[in-house]
Amino acid sequence: MTKLISANHLTKCYKARCVVNHINFDIEEDEIVALIGSNGAGKTTTISMLLGIVPQDSGTIEYWKSDFKKEIGTQLQSTPFFEGYTVEDNIKLFAAFYGISLSSNEMDEKLAAFDLLQVKKVSAIKLSLGQQKRLAIIVSTLHNPKLIILDEPSAGLDPRGQKEIQQIIRGLKEQGVTVLFSSHDMLEVMNIADRILMIHQGCIIANGSPSYLMEKYQTHHLEDLFFELTK
Ligand SMILES: Nc1ncnc2c1ncn2[C@@H]1O[C@H](COP(=O)(O)OP(=O)(O)OP(=O)(O)O)[C@@H](O)[C@H]1O
């Protein structure tokens, strides 16, 4: 397996408080990795350091290639659409940022794949949250990234919306995209993650496949493991 990312002793402190504290982990090609942890555990800070949005105070991040930024897609917690622009306009705009021009057929195929064809001409900021999250994933994958990083992609969605996001994440993996996502939904993590990174108070406290961790900690439910390890 090829390592896409290797984080070594990654640390971020705000004044005297280290919110991410000497963490080590790898992201391998073709896996779906779930980053889980309580509110304030350090997930978004970790993701932001991987994306270069927040500089680390110490530690290193090794990427698979020097111009890795061209091959990373991301969807952060807020959705980034332009006011007054339709769904289609937004996709065209983001495609233009990447120097991509989509044919009308390609546009419709993409929209249909994400169940958004019927809202093609609707202002993006008027979409439901689930539709906005799906649109955000479309725009973050327009450049065919090798790795996509999603910060709580299904937060606030109803069960159907959550399921749709899970199917999209699985579909990305089938297309050869590696996915790192954060989530508070243990069932979702069980459903789709190949590997779990559990972070607590800025430290990685568990790292392994769901089945490995269940076996190791002798539990049948990820939620129980979460409660036990984050006490
Ligand atoms: N710019 C900042 N200045 C000071 N403290 C910060 C800053 N950014 C984040 N923090 C703190 O770092 C800690 C980790 O925050 P982070 O957003 O990474 O947590 P999280 O695991 O993503 O939480 P959640 O699940 O609630 O999104 C929190 O205590 C937060 O208040």
Image (cartoon, rainbow, N blue to C red):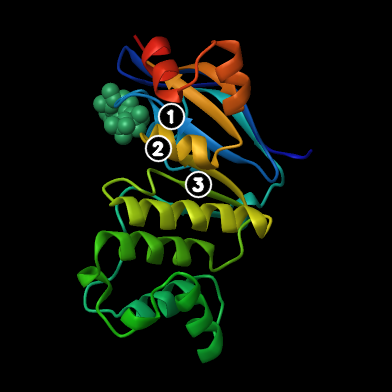
Which of the 4 image quarters holds residue 89? Answer: bottom left
Task: Name the secondary structure under disc 3.
Answer: strand
Along the polypeptide, which appears first: circle 2 or circle 1?
1
Judging from the image, what secondary structure is the residue with disc 2 in? loop
Q: Is residue 117 above or below residue 188?
A: below
Query: How dense is the environment of label 3, judged by Cα within 10 Å: few (below 14), some, or many (20 and up)?
Result: many
Q: Residues within 10 Å of mark 1 (few under 14, many from 20)?
A: many
Specify the quadrant of the image occupied by residue 208.
top right
Residue type for callout 1 = Ile
Picture residue at 38% right of the left edge, 26% below the top: 42
Position of residue 116 in the picture relative to residue 69 (left or right): left
Q: Which residue was labeled with disc 2?
A: 183
Circles 2 and 1 in contact, beta carbons < 8 Å: yes
In this view, the residue in front, 60 or 202, is 202
Check contact, mark 2 vs mark 3: CB within 8 A.
Answer: no
Answer left or right for 144 relative to 189: right
Q: Nearer the viewer, residue 36 or 41?
A: 36
Provide the secondary structure element on which disc 1 rests: strand
The residue drawn where x is 32% and y is 63% is 132
Mark number for residue 36?
A: 1
Q: Please tell me whether residue 102 is drawn above or below residue 221 in the rendered image.
A: below
Q: Confirm whether residue 66 shows in the render.
A: yes
- Seen at 58% across and 67% down, the residue is 143
Q: Where residue 149 is drawn, which disc sits there? A: 3
Q: CA distance from mark 2 to mark 1?
A: 6 Å
Q: In the orientation shown, which residue stands out farthest toward the front?
A: 220
Q: Amino acid at mark 3?
A: Ile
